[in-house]
């Protein structure tokens, strides 16, 4: 993610901030410029941007629940912002646990939508296009025997809000033997299925290229998952797949690889925003482990150049995490076939940029 700063006092800000901690100005995110704006209140819920005082905004309808800090122009007739208009079902907010979990779900969802906008991919809500649009159901288990299944079906993504409960999520991660499990990871995986439908499914040429890297997705999906859950992944899965689960079926391989592609694009964008440079003088293979993050990753054409930046970054941040007694930030090794798959995703995404914010956005 890029870096944001207060337009009044220059303080660096997080994407989720609603107030500048230094000068107290209200903040709101403008999805049309991908910028966090510093606001001056005009009363009646109307705000102006201190940098462009003629622009008038109000907060998204979910701001009243402390679940969103995105803005809408006053003239916009919608109640919800570009990220929240995708919500079809939210949990019962009268249950305090559910409200709290939903807020965590929203943090991950807003980061997902930010990166999709930054990548320039079309985001259409099901309220605008029932057939090809995207929608979210954020649901809670009502009975222990009736678990909400997470997944994607024809543009509808279901997230079980119990995944926002850290203790529960860690138990599930350990039970499934996963190296990584986060809400943001769930969103990136499920939206990968959605964009497969949009960008690959109905394009014969892309489908042929997809099969070259990911295999034939026409094999029985339910049967493939049954086999995976019965026998697990092949012992050499890491030679070809980014995760064990990716070996279950070409669709899951695509969604897992897509999620990692988004992890990489977002993390390198952050390294770029911070002007990071890695140069481990002690390393024997110093040239392979050195990198400068001088270029916005979205402007890099060849994904392999991005991978040359990714390895030094993961070595450095994994080492930083270990210094704090934390698990590795990126506990994965990317094999050459996975790089080819990600290169394919990078090419597909670049070819489908609808609204390339990065070409016009000013920081
Ligand atoms: Zn400030
Ligand atoms: Zn919103
Ligand atoms: Zn999946």
Image: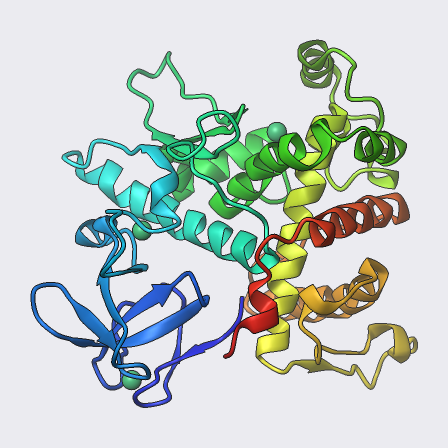
Q: Quadrant of residue 286?
A: bottom right
The residue depicted at 18 percent of the width and 39 percent of the height is 96
Rendering colour mode: rainbow
The residue depicted at 28 percent of the width and 71 percent of the height is 27
Q: Is residue 78 left or right of residue 228?
A: left
Viewer-side residue, 76 vs 198: 76
Where in the image, quadrant-wise, is ligand 1 located? bottom left
Q: Quadrant of residue 360?
A: bottom right
Q: Is residue 88 left or right of residue 193?
A: left
- The image shows residue 21 at horizontal and vertical percentages of 27, 79
- The image shows residue 336 at horizontal and vertical percentages of 89, 49
Q: From what the image shows, is residue 311 above or below residue 246?
A: below
Viewer-side residue, 78 vs 175: 78
Q: Quadrant of residue 85?
A: top left
- The image shows residue 334 at horizontal and vertical percentages of 80, 50
- The image shows residue 39 at horizontal and vertical percentages of 24, 76
Q: From what the image shows, is residue 275 above or below residue 332?
A: below
Residue 177 visible in rendering: no
Q: From what the image shows, is residue 295 above or below residue 170?
A: below
Count of labels shown? 0
The residue depicted at 86 percent of the width and 47 percent of the height is 340
Q: Residue furthest bottom?
A: 9
Image quarter in which the N terminus is found = bottom right
Residue 325 visible in rendering: yes
The residue depicted at 73 percent of the width and 51 percent of the height is 351
């Amino acid at each position: 993610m890029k870096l944001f700063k207060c337009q009044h006092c220059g303080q660096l800000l997080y994407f989720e901030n609603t107030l500048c901690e230094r000068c107290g100005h209200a903040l709101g995110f403008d999805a049309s410029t991908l910028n966090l704006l510093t606001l001056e209140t005009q009363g009646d819920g109307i705000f102006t941007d201190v940098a462009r005082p003629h622009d008038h905004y109000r907060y998204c309808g979910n701001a009243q629940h402390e679940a969103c800090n995105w803005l809408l122009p006053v003239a916009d007739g919608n109640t919800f912002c570009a990220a929240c208009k995708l919500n079809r079902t939210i949990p019962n907010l009268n249950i305090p646990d559910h409200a709290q979990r939903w807020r965590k779900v929203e943090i991950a969802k807003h980061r997902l939508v930010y990166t999709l906008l930054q990548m320039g991919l079309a985001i259409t809500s099901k309220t605008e296009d029932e057939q090809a649009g995207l929608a979210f159901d954020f649901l809670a288990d009502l009975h222990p025997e009736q678990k909400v299944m997470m997944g994607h079906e024809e543009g509808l993504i279901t997230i079980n809000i119990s995944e926002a409960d850290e203790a529960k999520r860690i138990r599930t991660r350990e039970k499934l033997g996963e190296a990584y499990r986060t809400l943001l990871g769930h969103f990136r995986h499920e939206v990968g299925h959605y964009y497969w439908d949009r960008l690959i499914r109905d394009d014969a040429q892309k489908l042929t290229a997809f099969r070259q890297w990911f295999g034939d997705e026409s094999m029985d999906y339910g049967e493939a998952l049954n086999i995976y859950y019965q026998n697990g992944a092949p012992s050499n899965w890491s030679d070809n797949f980014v995760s064990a689960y990716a070996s279950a079926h070409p669709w899951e391989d695509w969604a897992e690889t897509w999620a990692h592609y988004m992890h990489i694009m977002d993390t390198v964008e952050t390294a770029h925003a911070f002007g990071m440079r890695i140069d481990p003088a002690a390393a024997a293979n110093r040239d392979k482990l050195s990198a400068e993050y001088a270029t916005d990753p979205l402007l890099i054409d060849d994904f392999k150049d991005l991978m040359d930046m990714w390895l030094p970054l993961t070595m450095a941040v994994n080492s930083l995490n270990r210094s704090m007694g934390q698990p590795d930030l990126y506990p994965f090794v990317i094999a050459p076939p996975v790089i080819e798959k990600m290169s394919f995703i990078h090419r597909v995404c670049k070819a489908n940029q609808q609204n390339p914010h990065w070409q016009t956005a000013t920081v």
